Image (cartoon, rainbow, N blue to C red):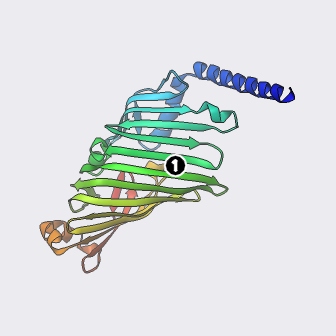
Amino acid sequence: MKGLMQAQRAGLTAAALMLFLLFCYIQFPTARIDTVIARILSQQGLTLSPAVHKTVLPGLAWDDLLLSSQQGALLRCERLQVRPLLLPLVVGQAVFSGAATIGKGQLDVRYALNGADALDLDAHDISLADIPFFKSVLGAKAAGNLWSRGTLKRNAKGLTGDLKVEVKQLELIGVKLGSFPLPDAANLKTQGIVRVSDGKARLESFTLEGDGVYMRISGDLPTGANAAVTPLNMRLEIMPKAEFMEKQKLVFMLLAKFMTSPGVYSLPIKGTLLKPEIL
């Protein structure tokens, strides 16, 4: 009998908490959320449109979302939805799920504000051609399907874990970083890992291999609310075969100062995400 009463009390407490949160959700104005988001993004020269709206279940959504900078569009989503998961609240965990539709692809994220399990990410079938960042920032034509999956844990020092990244049939044409062009390449096989340790992210040897060329990118990745304006510290290594170099002779002449040994070019990538440069 005592156990039954305790269970009833727990059920009533959970129901009361959910009703309270639902009431707060209904009363909370979305205009205030737009204002906060706009303030954070404006510090990095970014804008987000259209305005957010509430969903039938507790949550927020953007339809035909567009993230832009002064250079133009960076990211388009047919729909982006974020909502709190109510069941974990019963045991004292604040967990949010996010889902974004990008072209025919999908990105699903589960993020917990507290607890050991911090993040689960699953992205698949995202075409790089549907991401305007490559054109507006890099001046490039991009193709290929992005896949990524990983988890992050939380400890006293911050987030820790790995995110695997792969792009099938990657094509990059016309990439320019600052005043230096990069060689055009198509049908590249790629794979890499983003390793997170103590809250800091690093791209660990993301490799791009194609007919006549092998490339490797590594370095620290900017994270957090100021990621767009955080200085980059990355390196691109290019190891072309003779026939690949011959076809793009002018590009490799411009990159000659970065040759570290015969057939090996090491390019330091600086600047920011919105203005990457080879220096």
Identify the secondary structure beneath mark 1. loop
The outermost residue toward the bottom is 262
Disc 1 packing (10 Å; few <14; some 14–19; many ≥20): few
Q: Name the one closer to the observer, 271 or 135.
A: 135
Q: Residue at x 43, y 26 (%)?
A: 51
Q: Residue at x 70, y 37 (%)?
A: 91
Q: Position of residue 46 (x, y in %)?
A: 41, 40
Q: Quadrant of the C terminus?
A: bottom left
**Above or below, 97 relative to 183:** above
Q: Position of residue 173 (x, y in %)?
A: 21, 54
Left/right placement of residue 4 relative to residue 187 reads right
Three-letter residue code for mark 1 = Gly
The outermost residue toward the front is 1
**Above or below, 30 relative to 153:** above
Q: Residue at x 71, y 22 (%)?
A: 16
**Above or below, 237 relative to 45:** below
One can see residue 225 in this view = no
Q: Quadrant of the N terminus?
A: top right
Left/right placement of residue 186 relative to residue 47 reads left
